[in-house]
């Protein structure tokens, strides 16, 4: 699976995903550190990447566009340490089929993980 980790999250999350056998980049690594959300959505869509973020604007943008992708993994509900981020993301990836990720919004919270299929 291919991932684009957005600026609100640590580059260590991209490193962890790579160690798990995925292909992941952090926005900073690919020059997207000052890019708009629309530019990041376009890049992820063109590259077949699932966005991993804590930015609450992405679900709204996907809904307004009626988009079927890119997929989104959204951390909500407070600050997460690197260890918590990795633990919760690992739980989400274990729970949700990889084939569904490019067409879903996965919301990760401290106590639960939810999935909605796109478009919404």
Image (tube, rainbow, N blue to C red):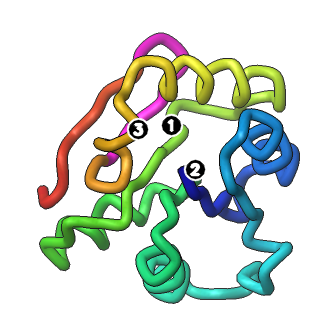
Q: Disc 2 marks which residue?
A: 54
Residue sitting nearer the eye, 33 or 45: 45
Does the stretch in magenta take in 106?
yes
Q: Residue 98 carries which label?
A: 3
Is there CB contact under 8 Å for labels 1 and 2? yes
In which quadrant will I find the C terminus? bottom left
Q: Which residue is drawn at 62% across and 63% down?
A: 4
Which secondary structure, mark 3?
helix
Q: Residue at x 57, y 52 (%)?
A: 52
Q: Residue 76 carries which label?
A: 1
Query: Magenta stretch?
Result: 105-112
Q: Which residue is drawn at 66% across and 46% down?
A: 22
How far apart are the two marked residues, 3 and 1, measured between alpha carbons? 21 Å
In the image, residue 27 sits, relative to residue 14, either above or below, namely below
The percent coordinates of residue 93 (x first, y second) are: 51, 28
Q: Residue 109 carries which label?
A: none
The percent coordinates of residue 119 (x first, y second) are: 13, 60
Residue sitting nearer the eye, 93 or 66: 93
How far apart are the two marked residues, 2 and 3, measured between alpha carbons? 20 Å
């Amino acid at each position: 699976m291919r991932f684009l980790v957005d600026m609100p999250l640590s580059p260590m999350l991209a490193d962890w995903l790579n160690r798990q056998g995925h292909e992941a980049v952090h926005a900073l690594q690919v020059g997207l550190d000052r890019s708009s959300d629309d530019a990041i959505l376009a890049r992820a869509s063109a590259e077949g990447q699932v966005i991993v973020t804590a930015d609450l604007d992405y679900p709204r943008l996907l809904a307004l566009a009626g988009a079927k992708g890119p997929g989104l993994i959204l951390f909500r509900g407070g600050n997460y340490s690197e260890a918590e981020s990795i633990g919760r993301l690992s739980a989400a990836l274990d729970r949700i089929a990889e084939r569904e990720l490019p067409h879903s919004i996965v919301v990760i919270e401290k106590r639960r993980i939810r999935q909605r299929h796109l478009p919404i």
